[in-house]
Amino acid sequence: MDDEKPKWREIVQFFEGRCPLELRDQFIKLRAKKEGFWTREEDIRLMVGYQTFGKNWRKIEELFRNKPNPRTERQIRERFIYRLGNLMPDKSWTEEDNNLLLELAKMHK
């Protein structure tokens, strides 16, 4: 995917009851799936890092450097928020919603 960001305010009209931020967050989660699965050891390292450094994602990232699958600050933050931190309310996305979101994000740049 190129560096142009999808125009969420245009895409949101295709999703009743959703806001642009929800679309962006779901899109990020979908893209993260392509970047490789997280291991149990990485999740533990992330949780220990969070307990030690709080939301200082840069410091936590240092725990992932020089590892077989280094992670970026953004990957770490998103893994915690969307999978481990239980901070976001769960509003289920259907497979159809996910496919439509990916397709519209490509079209609306």
Image (spheres, rainbow, N blue to C red):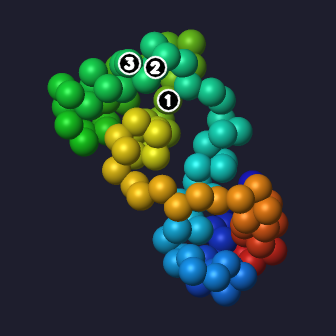
Residue identifier under label 2: 42
* Nearer mark to the viewer, of 3 and 1: 3
Instruction: Identify the element where label 3 is drawn.
Output: helix
- Looking at the image, tell me whether mark 3 or mark 1 is earlier in sequence order: 3
- Looking at the image, tell me whether mark 2 or mark 1 is earlier in sequence order: 2
The Cα atoms of the two marked residues, 2 and 1, are separated by 9 Å
The label on residue 71 is 1
Residue at image point 46% right, 19% down:
42
- State whether residue 52 is above or below residue 106: above
Q: Are marks 3 and 2 in contact (CB under 8 Å)?
A: yes
The label on residue 44 is 3
Question: Residue 100: horizontal and vertical position, in percent?
Answer: 78, 67
Q: Is residue 19 left or right of residue 50?
A: right
Which sits in the foreground, 89 or 62? 89
Question: Residue 32: horizontal and vertical position, in percent?
Answer: 61, 43
Residue at image point 40% right, 36% down:
84
The Cα atoms of the two marked residues, 3 and 1, are separated by 14 Å
Type of amino acid at the residue the image marks with label 3? Ile
* Nearer mark to the viewer, of 2 and 1: 2
Question: Residue 99: horizontal and vertical position, in percent?
Answer: 79, 60
Answer few, some or many: residues within 10 Å of disc 2's Cα (few below 14, many 20 plus, some between 14 and 19).
Answer: some
Instruction: Identify the element where label 1 is drawn.
Output: loop
Q: Are marks 2 and 1 in contact (CB under 8 Å)?
A: yes
Answer few, some or many: residues within 10 Å of disc 3's Cα (few below 14, many 20 plus, some between 14 and 19).
Answer: few
Type of amino acid at the residue the image marks with label 1? Arg
